[in-house]
Amino acid sequence: MSTISCFTEWDKLEAIIVGVPDYNCQPDHEPGVKAKIFSAASAKDFPVGLRPPGAYVAAQRELDNLIRVLTFYGVKVEHPEVLDWNQGISTPWWTAPVMHGASCPRDIITVIGKDIIESGMSSRCRFFEYAAYRGLIGRCLELDPASRWTAAPKPVLWDKAYRSDYPWKEDSEKRSSMIERKEFVTTEEDVIFEAADIMKFGRDLFVRHGFTTNLKGIDWLRRHLSWPNADAGVDAPFRVHAIDFPNDLCPLHMDATFFPIKAPDNERKGVIYNSPARRLRESLKPIFRDSFDILDAPQAQWTDSPPRSMCSPWLSMNMLHIDPSTIIVESTEKNTIKHLESLGMKVVQCPFRSCYEMGGSFHCHTSDLHRQGMQVDYFKHLTTTQVTRESSA
């Protein structure tokens, strides 16, 4: 790894962070976590603390295989530090009996242009997760003097940062009406965003408004990225769009809901997968009309998740591009594999379901440090004024 740069989800990958499963814990049922659990009865299926030893062994085996694949394609792999997450933490306003882990770097670290951005996380158990990445980020800055490191404002995460009485997922009617009104478990008391809510499309960034990213977080991103930086290869201000998916009863992290598959070229539009269970808000679809076709993602192979996983079956969409025509997919997702191949994609199949328990699939367990490519404008029909209006909607 010699440089830091990333503008898309699909350009040729050269360097990446791969998470570590060690000491990954099931967190306490704090407000930001409880909202992901189906019901009070099912909460017992998620005991707080360390997972069974076999879970770490199985996850590491799959991660080692992924690292072999990435290395075969010439990708430089970096890791966060292994830390003990099985210990309590506190601030003046709250306590948590355990933390979460460094399995999913996509949630906390994103590279936009040459800017390494550290998120302000939405859950108390993840407050100190940044510690695992400080050494890695320091090495990145030494290797690439043109890169920079920005830590977003750390949220306080006090009680008023949450709607503490947020309904369980089983209370679908009440929860659905709240989500339609964009009333999520996180309030606007803090600047909150998680990097897995961001999808990079060249000059345009699409940021999901939901449980793990609020409007203040999106506004912070828009302000921070609103000027060009020629030294960092950023020729024009980034445009930041707030988007949401009103049918999703657990709206968090974009990459199992809305995922770019192919980039546009001179002959045809690009392709985006959208989960048919949680489609993009209709009023937002015109943004993509001229540049991308939005297709229903193929049906997931599984109707449930592995034990102790809080992730949805739509992790079938949670893939990782090696380059614009090569993509890594979970090996059991035959519907997805078949459809991607029909689109002309080369599919690299890897087993990864054991990693789901740690918080996600390929996209979640990684975070791009360097992809070839520059700041392409795929949405020339948009103006800064239009984007500002969409982002603040």
Image (tube, rainbow, N blue to C red):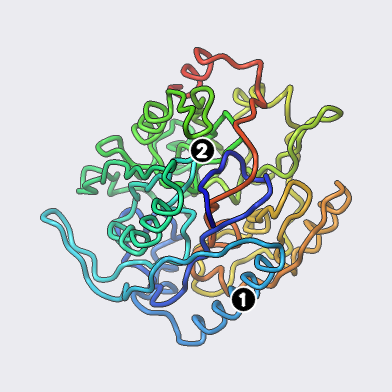
Secondary structure beneath label 1: helix
What residue is shown at x 81% (from left), y 52% (from top)? 340
Quadrant of the rendered image containing residue 26 = bottom left
Identity of the amino acid at label 2?
Gly
Q: Secondary structure at mark 2?
A: loop
Outermost residue toward the left in this view: 92
Residue 238 position, x and y percent, is 50, 27
* Residue most extreme to the bottom: 53
Rendered location of residue 81, percent (x, y): 38, 69
Please tell me whether residue 142 is drawn above or below residue 213 in the rendered image.
Answer: below
Label of residue 113 in the image: 2
Question: What residue appears at the point 58 percent right and 38 percent down from the top-left corner?
Answer: 7
Q: Residue at x 36, y 66 (%)?
A: 100
Query: For the residue marked with disc 1, what is the amino acid?
Result: Glu
Task: Name the residue carrying label 1.
Answer: 62
- The reply to whether callout 1 and callout 2 are in contact (CB within 8 Å) is no
